[in-house]
Amino acid sequence: MDLVPVLEEPLKKALGAATAKVMAEHLGLHTVGDLLHHYPRRYEERGQLTHLADLPMDEHVTVVAQVADARLHTFASAKAPRGKGQRLEVTITDGSGRVQLVFFGNGVHKPHKDLLPGTRAMFSGKVSVFNRRLQLAHPAYELLRGEDDEAAESVDSWAGALIPIYPATAKLESWKIAKSVQTVLPSAQQAVDPLPHPLRDGRGLVSLPEALLKIHRPGTKADIHDARARLKWDEAFVLQVALARRRHADTQLPAVAREPLPDGLLTAFDARLPFTLTEGQQKVSREIFDGLATEHPMHRLLQGEVGSGKTMVALRAMLAVVDAGGQAAMLAPTEVLAQQHHRSVTEMMGELAQGGMLGGAEHATKVVLLTGSMGAAARRQALLDLVTGEAGIVIGTHALIEDKVQFHDLGLVVVDEQHRFGVEQRDALRGKGKQPPHLLVMTATPIPRTVAMTVFGDLETSVLDQLPAGRSPIASHVVPAADKPHFLARAWERVREEVENGHQAYVVCPRIGDEEDDPKKGARKKSPEDEAEKRPPLAVLDVADQLAKGPLQGLRVEVLHGRMHPDDKDAVMRRFAAGETHVLVATTVIEVGVNVPNATAMVIMDADRFGVSQLHQLRGRVGRGSAAGLCLLVSEMPEASPARQRLNAVASTLDGFELSRIDLEQRREGDVLGQAQSGVRSSLRMLAVIEDEEIIAEARDEATAVVAADPDLTDLPGLRVALDALLDEEREQYLDKG
């Protein structure tokens, strides 16, 4: 099939080597098709001025504005001692504010001639502050009306009434991108449409060539609306077709059906439970058991609120597989978490976890732990138990993936916290089964439905949104340490009160604080007003020392962080779990899975340095028993700052799904799709996952129907071309590995 050679044409051929090189290096654009899909960020209306008052600091911006004033100053300098140094200051304005442009030295002559009061132009440069005023130093500019009629005319020719403003770089201004787009725009006529005709006609969508023309050269706002509606559908539909094909291919693979014995290990385990499973746990368990009973691999995402009992559901699934003669492996992201899971699973199972040992129950199996730091003898024994089938359940870190690890009959892989594992790691473990094992992915960060459909679209989804009986509510409060220092003093009093009442507390800090821990690493950009961000983040070792000598003197305070020796970490967690330690000062190693029901209070220092989902995760470590939980979010950020608004949002709701929406709206999809999941750039340029919920849901239904009718897309060559473009080799592998 003809692969649309015009759109595949290298930009070098269409635009020349110099421009193509900048586009490739700075914008990742290589072909004519890439450039046509580099859409304008927004549009300026001729005659309407932009909001200069809202310019972001330290960012590269393009604005359309009018020259209010231009002054040439002459001054003496080292290079021009006789007062011949020149500086041109131009003030540009819109309805909302003013910005100063500054030009120096030989660079003043052309702008001094061009930028007369009343002239309108596009200006592009980096926003900075000088003498408490916003300025652009040596901005590039393009006249829109005035002296340079030729430039004004050229802009008119491609812009019409609406001027597209493109995502640009310092090396390539928006109007230069616009002129390049103008050069290749005729090629859009040859774009092959990926949407099936019935779908396009049924939804009243314009053709792809028309959409590309309207997005780059809109005559009216209605043109922009039509183009966006169409291009959003392209992104949603092509991605959902890729995922639907993945799901369809999975149904063609063979797997061993795993059904629990009527009176086996699972029945014995359920009989031991001192509580009744919630309705949600029962419903989700049924969905998982139905998946395990099929002869093709189950691929299921289990997501739920912090503390909703996901581990219990996963354990029952593992026991069902062991009942059916298979083995189950649970992959945890950290050693602390692997040890924690191993401890809680063996405690929950009791004598059922003592297979082959004295005192083991009739249906018992062995539960082994496998981590990178285990001693040689223990490791050898664990490997032997796996290859002989003696161990029905193994819990471990990425050490499970090594070549030496072999299973007797791997039937189920449970991955805890999907986003912490690379695709290759999950794939390597799945490859250890004689036939593809069933896969259960657990995530403790609730994901909005649309993200689940877009990122985990090849997995069936089960949601646990009910908290088990006996779980207590958690009260959350923001502690403004800079505005009200006495609030922080009161926070430490509250920790003392919890300990006096027989409970325990966590204190969480963003940093460890030893010599390897460089506070400059990962430091975020500071705006001049960010006083709180001028110091390095608070560190575990410093804070623990200050608390033990100060407000928490007399209490048993210990530290826990990722650079401790695994045996030391385990010993600290055991002492804390046993109630011997009153206060645990830790990094985010306690974020997931750590379960100490007696811990009722948590103080998170520099809470503004953590993400919304991370704060929600951390908070879930308290209130796990019958006593109410308390979470105090300490921050020095000013009240009106976005960071404080984020903390207020966390304090105001315990609904993780709501918080994940807030988090996504603030971070945008690039973090969730693309880099975070597949290791490649997000393919979504037009689609906003949260806003376009309806389109994504409808696209999924349409895609599922299309793939069911024609799995190889034989009758849809345009869709195959679009899939090839989306699924470059790297992304194809990502989807193939699930």
Image: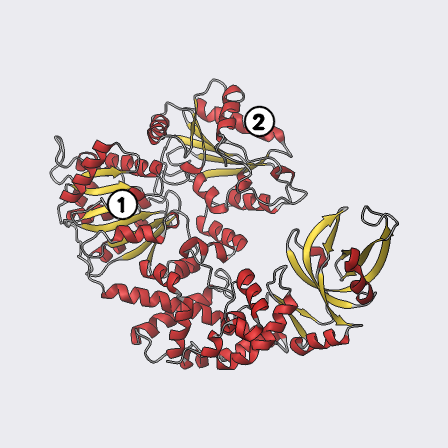
Label 1 belongs to which residue? 402
Res 590 → quadrant: top left
Res 103 → quadrant: bottom right
SS class of the residue under badge 2?
helix
| Left or right of 398, for residue 668 | right
Quadrant where the N terminus is found in the figure: bottom left
Residue 432 horizontal/vertical position (percent) = 22, 51
Label 2 belongs to which residue? 489
The amino acid sitting under disc 2 is Ala
Residue farthest to the right, as pictured: 82
User: Badge 1 local density, few (<14 within 10 Å), some, or many (20+)?
Assistant: few
Q: Residue 361's mark?
A: none
| Left or right of 132, for residue 4 | left
Residue at 44% of width from left, 39% of height from top? 618
The CA distance from mark 1 to mark 2 is 49 Å
Residue 272 horizontal/vertical position (percent) = 21, 38
SS class of the residue under badge 1?
loop
Residue at 62% of width from left, 61% of height from top? 171
Quadrant where the C terminus is found in the figure: bottom left
